[in-house]
């Protein structure tokens, strides 16, 4: 089975610019997650979708971050405007159905964002 | 506040020995716990899941224990090999209150297996 696809792999922008990341989850997976991983830290959940609805976005800085999952498949995460502290790896993950506790999450390889 | 601690940032062991990684947590009541492996420049890869009512889980050379009284999980790799060198992440799963489960990750332990 094909894994979680993310693009781009790397992105360098200046502060106050905008950037968007794209994720294609594993086919048939209802739950999609976006995580932020700062160097030396574990992934931190930003937003979770169940099909095309938002389940939890409590840790998403909504003044600058937005995300959508159209048609319950692909998803995009946007940052506008970017700040220096947004430099991190942005990971997308999916699971068959996050409503059940026996679900492993499958991660993409992430987008490494550097803010100058 | 909720806290997840993995015993050390880095662990070096000799090839063939058993590596033991520790995950401790406070102010948390997880329904389950997962362990992931992460290689440099890659996303985490799922290894094992253990539920709160299970004491031990095994998969090939991997073994996980879960003690909800001690609030601790131990992750063992027996007969370790240089290919086991990676960062290992502990993740606690709990009901998110919005219709789904969520994971909270520790910082990880970087394991180096020396030939």
Image (cartoon, coloured by chain):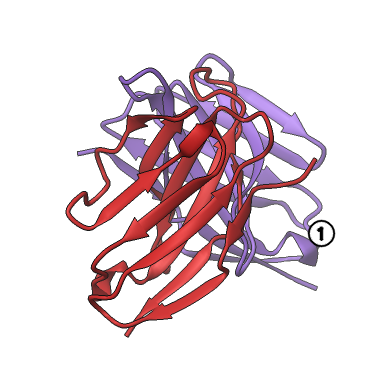
Chain colours: A red, B purple
As helix, strand or loop, the secondary structure at mark 1 comes to loop
Q: Residues within 10 Å of mark 1 (few under 14, many from 20)?
A: some
Q: Can the viewer see residue B6?
A: no
Residue at the farthest top position: B53
Q: Is residue B62 left or right of residue B109?
A: right
State which quarter of the image contains the C terminus of chain A.
Answer: bottom left
Left or right of residue B84: residue B27? left
Horizontal relation, residue A101 to residue A49: left or right: right
Q: Chain of mark 1?
A: B
Residue labelled with disc 1: B16
Vertical relation: B63 (above or below) B45: above
Name the residue: 56% across, 37% down: A73
**Image quarter in which the N terminus of chain A is found:** top right
Image quarter for residue B81? bottom right
* Residue B103 % position (x, y): 44, 36
| Residue A78, quarter of the rendered image | bottom left
- Name of the residue lying farthest toward the front: A71
Q: Position of residue A115 (x, y in %)?
A: 34, 79
Write the residue at 49% across / 45% down.
A75
A45 or B106: nearer the eye?
A45
Q: Residue at x 78, y 67 (%)?
A: B82
* Residue B16 visible to the viewer: yes
Vertical side of B18 occupied by B2: above or below = above
Q: How many marks?
A: 1
- Closer-to-camera residue (A93/B34): A93
- Kindly identify the residue that appears in the image at 31 percent across and 83 percent down: A14
Residue A40's spot in the image, x, y percent?
A: 42, 66
- Near-viewer residue (B33 or A103): A103
Q: Relative to A19, does residue A65 appear above or below in the rendering?
A: above
| Place of residue A96 in the rendered image (x, y in percent of width and height, measured from the top left) | 62, 27
Q: Nearer the viewer, residue A85 or B46?
A: A85
């Amino acid at each position: 089975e094909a894994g979680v696809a993310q693009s781009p792999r790397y992105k360098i922008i200046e502060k106050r610019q905008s950037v968007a990341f794209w994720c294609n989850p594993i086919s048939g997976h209802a739950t999609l997650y976006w995580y932020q991983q700062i160097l030396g830290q574990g992934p931190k959940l930003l937003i979770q979708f169940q099909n095309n609805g938002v389940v939890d976005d409590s840790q998403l800085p909504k003044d600058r971050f937005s995300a959508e999952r159209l048609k319950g498949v692909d998803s995009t995460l946007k940052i506008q405007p970017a700040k220096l502290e947004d430099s991190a790896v942005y990971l997308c993950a999916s699971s068959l159905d996050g409503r059940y506790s026996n679900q492993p999450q499958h991660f993409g390889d992430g987008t490494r964002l550097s803010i100058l | 506040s909720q806290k997840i601690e993995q015993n050390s940032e880095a662990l070096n062991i000799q090839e063939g020995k058993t590596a033991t990684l520790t995950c401790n947590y406070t102010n948390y009541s997880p329904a389950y716990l997962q362990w992931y492996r992460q290689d440099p420049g890659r996303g985490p890869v799922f290894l094992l899941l253990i539920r709160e009512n299970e004491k031990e889980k095994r998969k090939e050379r991997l073994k996980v224990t879960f003690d909800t009284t001690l609030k601790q999980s131990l992750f063992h790799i027996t007969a370790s090999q240089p290919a086991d060198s990676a960062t290992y992440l502990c993740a606690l799963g709990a009901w998110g209150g919005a219709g789904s489960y969520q994971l909270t990750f520790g910082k990880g332990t970087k394991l180096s297996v020396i030939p």
